[in-house]
């Protein structure tokens, strides 16, 4: 199995025991983590941003979350991938089109995975509209569960 780029929700589910899909993600990780997994600046920032919201009541500060993230990223199967392309590249990769503001981050993550020869691991089935065909979805996206 090739490495997977975890989207924000997958990374949160992995790192936060309070997430409704934490156990499922932890099981996936035990089975697949050594084969390789990746994050990028967007997923790392999203992890901190979401889990530091007072409405979640995690009780964790940004500094504590950053430390927890750093410990997770020390895993031997982890790889940091760069976001070294522009939106023109995103539009070229997303054959189903990017039609709304809520798709922009997902489109960047999908493009990152494709450019790195990985699949994007996600909990979000709505992401599938970014690709035009089932064959593309099968090649570039893995849905947890």
Image (cartoon, rainbow, N blue to C red):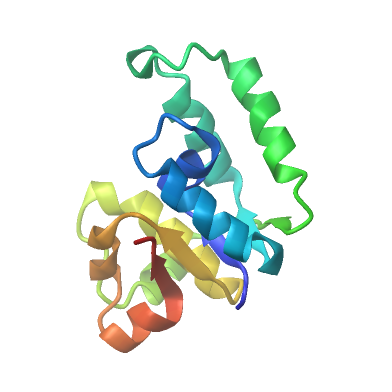
Up-down relation of residue 90 to residue 72 (above or below): below
Residue 127 is left or right of residue 64, and the answer is left
Residue at x 59%, y 64% (from the top left corner): 31
Up/down of 89 relative to 27, above or below: below
Q: Is residue 108 above or below residue 21?
A: below
Quarter holding residue 110: bottom left
Residue 62 falls in which quadrant of the image?
Answer: top right
Viewer can see residue 39: yes
Q: Quadrant of the N terminus?
A: bottom right
Can you name the residue that lies furthest to the bottom here? 135
Q: Considering depth in this image, is 83 or 6 the residue closer to the camera?
A: 6
Looking at the rendering, which quadrant does residue 30 occupy? Answer: bottom right
Residue 75 image offset from top left, x and y in percent: 75, 49
Picture residue at 60% right of the left edge, 24% below the top: 65
How far from the left and from the top, in percent, is residue 42?
Answer: 52, 44
- Quarter in which the C terminus is drawn: bottom left
Q: How many numbered markers are drawn?
A: 0
Kindly identify the residue that appears in the image at 39 percent across and 35 percent down: 19
Please indicate whether residue 49 sits to the left or right of residue 29 in the image: left
Residue 24: x percent and y percent? 43, 51
The residue shown at (67%, 65%) is 36
Left or right: residue 134 versus residue 60 is left
- Whether residue 84 is visible here, answered yes or no, is no
Is 2 left, or right, of 96 in this rendering? right
């Amino acid at each position: 199995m090739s490495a997977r780029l975890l989207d924000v929700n997958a990374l949160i589910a992995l790192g936060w025991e309070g997430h409704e899909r934490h156990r499922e993600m932890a099981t996936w990780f035990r089975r697949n983590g050594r084969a390789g997994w990746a994050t990028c600046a967007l997923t790392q920032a999203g992890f901190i941003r979401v889990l530091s919201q007072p409405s979640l009541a995690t009780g964790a500060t940004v500094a504590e979350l950053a430390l927890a993230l750093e410990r997770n990223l020390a895993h031997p199967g982890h790889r940091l991938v760069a976001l070294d392309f522009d939106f023109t590249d995103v539009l070229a990769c997303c054959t189903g089109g990017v039609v709304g503001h809520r798709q922009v981050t997902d489109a960047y993550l999908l493009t990152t995975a494709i450019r790195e020869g990985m699949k994007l691991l996600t909990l979000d089935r709505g992401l599938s509209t970014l690709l035009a065909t089932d064959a593309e979805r099968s090649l570039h996206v893995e849905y947890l569960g």
